[in-house]
Image (spheres, rainbow, N blue to C red):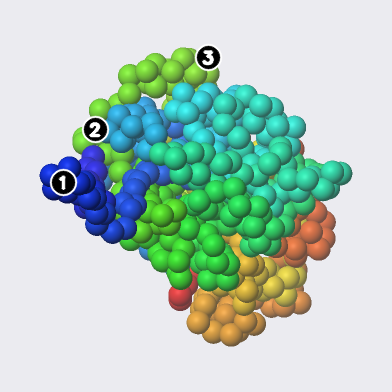
Amino acid sequence: MTYTKFFIPVLGITSILILSCNSIKKSATMDKPNPQKVASISILHTNDMHGSYMQFETNLGNATAQTGDSIDNYMKFERKAKIGGFEYLASAIKSVRKNKGDDSVLLLDGGDTFSDDQLGNLTKGEAMIKMMNEMHYDLMALGNHDFDYGLERTNELQILANFPMRAANIIVKETGNPIFGKPYVIINKQGINIAILALSYRNTPLTGNSKNIEGLEFGIGAEAVKEYLPILTEKADIIVLLSHEGMSVDKIIAEEIEGIDLIVGAHSHDVISPPIKIKDTYIVQALSDVAILGETEIQISNNKIININANYHYLWHDEMSPDVQMQEMINQLRKPYLSKLEEKITETNTIIGRQYKSESPFDKMVTSMMVEKLNVDATFLPGVGYGISLHGDITSEDIYKLLPHPAKIVTLEMTGEQIRRTLEQTATNLRPKNTMDIVGGLIQSSGIHYRLDLSKPIGQRISNIKINNHALVDTEIYKVATHSGMLNGIHNYEEFSRGINIQTTEIVLTEFVLQNLREIKELSFPKRMGEVTLIK
């Protein structure tokens, strides 16, 4: 790892000259400005870890193991190698603290932290919190997936954590107060008060099981910032926003609200390099899945940021050594569940990755399996941005990394018109009129061909729809399969609940996929890729 060193010039000298002549002493003072202390503080940050405490291997077509196709900020790795893992993250954090000193370092996490992984499911998030405690985080923003085990469990985890988990725009309806208490911290480093205000994702109710967040209200992050900014300005010298609103919304906040020095972002899985500067606000973000430790080094003089340097420490295994203490902790946390985690399901000699805002090979494999086994015309799953790429031996842990939630398979009948409206909704999710309405990725499907042109006006973006190689007929009835999350309207997909002959099975999708993969000696690349023509 490399670190940028700053050389600080002397800004001013006050000199007192004592002149003496015989018994008469005269003095004169040279009037020069008092020196202004320049402080250099490193804000370390992670985001969207999604329970990814284990290493993975990068693939050149994917940004992390799974999301290389952001419409707004495309990024991909330049080489194929092992990266990530908490033992390497811990090593990087300790290295920065050793080099910079504790009084010059903060550690933040942007949320979507402890679920979306089999060990996460088995321990209901406790494993990740224990590892984070060892690294002494200062604050975590609550992301939309941090309620995957239910509100009661999230509360238990924030009690277990030795750092606050907060969000200014999540309000407890019964009390009218922010969840878990004061949504900000003020930390003094080198005599400078730094306020960090946490925000969650405004559209959280559209991304998961609504029962998990009963009693909570998710507001617009910008409105919460406006409420707290006057309070923080009185108490602190530097204002930092720890935001799970996504890069596009963070840009709006920076444009519309003055007084924020730095936004440390999350949710959109972006590497923002170099930092974005809008007016007087800088914006940074450090990808996802513990592939990178972000280090945003701010230089402060006269209570203002005068310079910023963003260092992205890629956790390449061939460039650093793991932290032995964290390695031992991970081994102990895995030990009770090892047989489940490491069960070999099948293998593949090709790379089957996940994409978010385009056709995803892994999700195509799953939806194709559903078409064939459930005897339906087409299948639909939500576009999600977490997971790994499958290659070589495939374990149970690998599949749970891609399908961590206990959603049940659903079959139903829909008209062609309802299917058309569903595809229009996915276009709206990707590029709505209002940036604040962005939610989810491209709907993942099999058995249906169509063209999606995001450059066209709303209502004209979907064309050439075919099912079973025949043009879609609006009045015709089609049998489709999806899962219970889609039936409940996640990502604004409302048409599924309006279908007929809806059958919610007791079959959990993850177990369905595991069982079918066990019967396959070697998994091939999905044949149905190319059903969607996407023009960005």
Residue 438 pos. (x, y %): 60, 65
Q: Amino acid at mark 2?
A: Met
N-terminal-most mark, 1 or 2: 1
Q: Amino acid at mark 3?
A: Pro
Number of numbered markers: 3
Residue 1: which quarter of the image? top left
Instruction: Please indicate, yes or no, whether residue 516 appears anywhere in the rendered image.
Output: no
Tag 1 secondary structure: strand
Q: Quadrant of the C terminus?
A: bottom left
* Residue located beneath label 1 in the image: 20
Q: Where is residue 174 shown, x and y percent of the image? A: 86, 44
Residue 201 occupies quadrant: bottom right
To which residue does mark 2 refer?
Answer: 320
**Cα–Cα span, label 1 and label 2:** 62 Å
Q: Which residue is mark 3?
A: 336
* Vertical side of 361 occupied by 162: above or below: above
